[in-house]
């Protein structure tokens, strides 16, 4: 398998590993908020948006489960393989 396909596969896996915990947390917060809205019969859009916004801010301030470290590792991998990518055949 060509190196660029391996790096593309690594990039897609890295993107999934970095964003999956964030999306999962936001989905859980949205589900809990919607259950509260249904139980208390609140029809306010602000009540649905604020908890997700606060959760996203807290995740951003705490580092988002090490997403920056994951992307740093991927960037290092791409930079170390750059000379090989330039010299290889693309067919």
Image (tube, grey):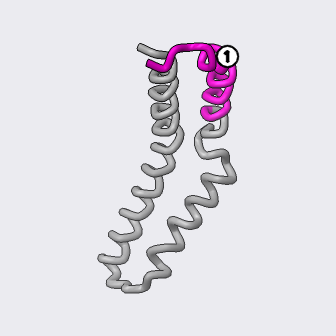
Q: Which residues are magenta?
A: 70-91
Measured as percent of width and height from the top left, residue 30 is found at 41, 64
Q: Is residue 65 left or right of residue 43?
A: right
Residue in view at x 63 percent, y 57 percent: 58
Against 46, is 87 above or below? above
Measured as percent of width and height from the top left, residue 66 is found at 62, 37
Measured as percent of width and height from the top left, residue 22 is found at 51, 49
Against 48, is 42 above or below? below
Residue in view at x 46 percent, y 31 percent: 13
Question: Is residue 50 highlighted in magenta?
Answer: no
Q: Which residue is mark 1?
A: 83
User: Of residues 75 and 47, which is closer to you in this image?
Assistant: 75
Q: Secondary structure at mark 1?
A: helix
Residue in view at x 50 percent, y 22 percent: 4
**Which quadrant of the rendered structure holds the N terminus?**
top left
Question: Is residue 85 highlighted in magenta?
Answer: yes
Residue in view at x 49 percent, y 20 percent: 90
User: Of residues 7 and 17, which is closer to you in this image?
Assistant: 7
Q: Is residue 18 left or right of residue 33?
A: right
User: Of residues 72 and 81, which is closer to you in this image?
Assistant: 81
Against 3, is 58 above or below? below
Dot 1 crowding, Cα within 10 Å, few <14, some 14–19, many 20+: few
The tally of labels here is 1
**Which quadrant of the rendered structure holds the C terminus?**
top left
Name the image quarter holding residue 65. top right
Question: Would you say the magenta stretch is mainly helix, strand or loop?
Answer: helix
User: Of residues 29 and 88, which is closer to you in this image?
Assistant: 88
């Amino acid at each position: 398998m060509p190196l660029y396909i391996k790096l593309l596969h690594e990039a897609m896996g890295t993107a999934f590993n970095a964003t999956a915990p964030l999306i999962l947390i936001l989905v859980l917060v949205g589900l809990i908020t919607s259950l509260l809205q249904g139980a208390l019969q609140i029809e306010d859009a602000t009540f649905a948006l604020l908890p997700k916004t606060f959760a996203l801010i807290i995740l951003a301030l705490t580092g988002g489960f090490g997403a920056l470290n994951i992307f740093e590792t991927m960037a290092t991998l791409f930079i170390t393989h750059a000379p090989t990518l330039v010299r290889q055949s693309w067919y």
